[in-house]
Amino acid sequence: MNDVITFEVIKKIYEEEKKSENKLAPLPSDFFQKAIDYINKKKQIAKSKSDEKVFVEIKNLERILEEIFNMRERKILNLALVYLRSKTEVKNLTSEEEKIFNSIVKILEERRDVFKKALKGKISFIVFKKDYHQFVGFDGKKYGPFKVGDKVKIDEIPKEFINILKEANVVEVIESE
């Protein structure tokens, strides 16, 4: 696909995205950044010429670009759910969208794991292998201090800290029936 962004290219991509209901249409590399750069150049031209026609074109471009972004965002969310159920390959993600897609899939997989474990009656705990000082989580809450042998339900401490504590060999994760 041509990487030069014009009004016609943006409009064509909009039509393709709209037409491909459940799939992502292919995009030129760095499409969104290039489209924003194109609109900003148009704005500079419009300011220097005070051309009302160009201002209208800019507003249309912004509206179309935002609609493309919103359609792709909805599709990415739906595709993440489909992927979890069927492991169907997802195509035409930009590199930024791929990061978002992978993050969504990871969060949903973690949620499903917790649900499945709960269904089986398993409860996950962390057991402290070393004393650990009190800390403040990203949520602003205080946690601890903890002593060797303290047992805490895994959902009572932010997941990010559990990972940090595991890597530092401070805690061990235990599942019980």
Image (spheres, rainbow, N blue to C red):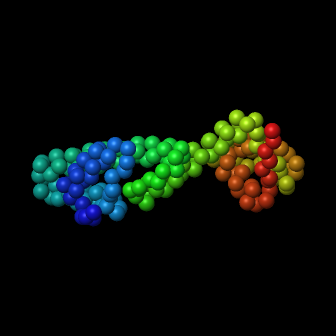
Q: Nearer the viewer, residue 91 or 133?
A: 91
Q: Nearer the viewer, residue 42 or 75?
A: 75
Q: Find residue 76 and report its horizontal and vertical position in percent.
A: 43, 47
Q: Residue at x 62, y 41 (%)?
A: 112
Identify the image quadrant of residue 91. Answer: bottom left
As displayed, is residue 39 above or below residue 177?
Answer: below
Q: Answer with left or right where residue 115 lies relative to residue 168.
A: left
| Residue 113 seen from this side | yes
The residue sitting at 76% across, 43% down in the picture is: 124
At 83% from the left and 44% from the top, the residue drawn is 151
Q: Residue at x 37, y 48 (%)?
A: 23
Compared to residue 128, the image places residue 168 above or below, namely: below
- Res 9 quadrant in image: bottom left
Query: Which percent across, then down, holds residue 31?
Result: 32, 59
The spot of residue 141 in percent (x, y) is 69, 42
Q: Is residue 28 above or below residue 111?
A: below
Residue 62 shows up from this direction: no
Residue closer to the observer: 160 or 15: 15
Residue 24 in the image: x percent, y percent?
37, 50
Seen in the image, is 99 located left or right of residue 58? right
